[in-house]
Structure formats: C-alpha cells, structure tokens
Image: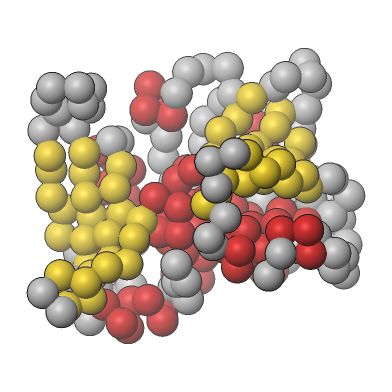
Amino acid sequence: MKLANILDSKSSAERLEGSSPSSGTDKQFLENLAYITGVAIGDGNLSNPSGRSVRLRVSCDTKYPEIIKEICTSLKIILPKNKVSLIKRKCNCVDISCYSKNWKDWLSWKHDKGPKYTQQIKIPDWIKNDSEYSKSCLRGLFQTDGSIYFDRKYKMVNFVTTIPNLANEIVDMINKLGFLPKTQILSARDKMRHAKYTVRISKNTENFIKTINLTK
C-alpha cells in the first residue's frame, strides 16, 4: 500500500466530547486511545512548535505500511476533526503528526518537562485496569518498540525500554492476560547512558500475538 493512499478514506466516527477518557466516551474511542497511548510511549514525541496545540509525532519505518495505516486510522477516530499529517523522510522513515490540546491530558507525560525517561512515563490506570484496553495498548507498544523474531527456530516477542517502572507495568499487564514474560536487564555501560529492560515472551508466543492482534 502506498503512503499517499493511507489517508484517502475518511473515518465515520463522530467527535467525542471531553478532553479526557473519563468524560463518558465510548468503547471504540477508548480502545483506539489505548492503542495510540502505546504507540506514543513507544515511538512518540510531544512538542509545541506553534505555542498553541501540542503535536504528537510518531516515526515509523516505511516497510510497515499497515502499521502506519492503523496509527493514522486510530488518530482519526479519536480526533476526527484534526488533521493527520504524513511527512516522508530520507531514511526510509515517515513521521505521522497530529496536533491537539488534549494530548496533555490523555498521555502520561508533558511536552515541556524533558525526555520520557526523565519524566518516568507510565501507562494510565484506566488502561491497566481493563483487559481489552490493555491489549490495545500492548499492541501499540510492541508494534513500535517491540519485535517478533526467531531464536533457534522458536518464535519470540519482546519489548525494550530504558524505564524500569514501565517494564514492570508491561509485565503486569501481560501476566493478567495469562502469559508469563521474563525481563532481562542490560546494565548501562560504555556509550549506553541507561540500563535496558527487555520484556520477552518465549512461551505460548503465537497465542500472545493473536491475543493482542499484533502485526509487525
């Protein structure tokens, strides 16, 4: 699928009132917001270049057109009146951007408080406390900062972060879905400023992929 075709179709979802998910919104909205929350935590960046609305920018490899399409579609469902922009970069990468005054309320970090590591971002409770929203969020997380690979012919899925509390939250969410992930810690050394936490699913992997509807 060509990038130019991704935004052709228009979402039929109506604008949902309120600046936070606690304001009486519906399940479709919350599932998509949970997914975008995972995407934003994984590969998202918040900024305020205009001095007005905050911009969420997500960078994706162009070899994943279906993931790019899913991100754009979800953004249009939660913000159908806001423009979703695609900017292709030279390094086989595309930036997906969407401005909104709601990002400061919906996401767990602020655009002007430093990097996500400094703010020690976390997954909102309303996501962690609901299995369906957890699945949507996990899909966004693993699509951006995760991978599916084979180790000695065994399929594996992992997620990598430098934020220890985030790794623990992800482990708890996966445990609640009935899976048993393991966490590997790679201590900071040489040019690596922070330790890396790899959350890995090595057993019942195919079922986990189906459970969160993961494509990569």
The answer to which of 71 and 94 lies nearer the viewer is 94
The answer to which of 110 and 67 lies nearer the viewer is 67
Is residue 30 visible in the rendered image? The answer is no
Give the percent coordinates (x, y) of residue 212: 44, 73
In which quadrant will I find the C terminus? Answer: bottom left
Q: Which residue is drawn at the image coordinates 28% and 36% (left, top)?
A: 162
- Horizontal side, residue 176 vs residue 32: left or right: left
Using the rendered view, name the quadrant where residue 35 is placed: bottom right
Using the rendered view, name the quadrant where residue 48 is placed: top right
The answer to which of 21 and 194 lies nearer the viewer is 194
- Horizontal side, residue 155 vs residue 185: left or right: right
Give the percent coordinates (x, y) of residue 116: 43, 29
Q: Which residue is drawn at the image coordinates 32% and 83% (left, top)?
A: 207
The answer to which of 34 and 63 lies nearer the viewer is 63
In which quadrant will I find the N terminus? Answer: bottom right
Give the percent coordinates (x, y) of residue 63: 53, 60
Q: Which residue is drawn at the image coordinates 84% and 45% (left, top)?
A: 83
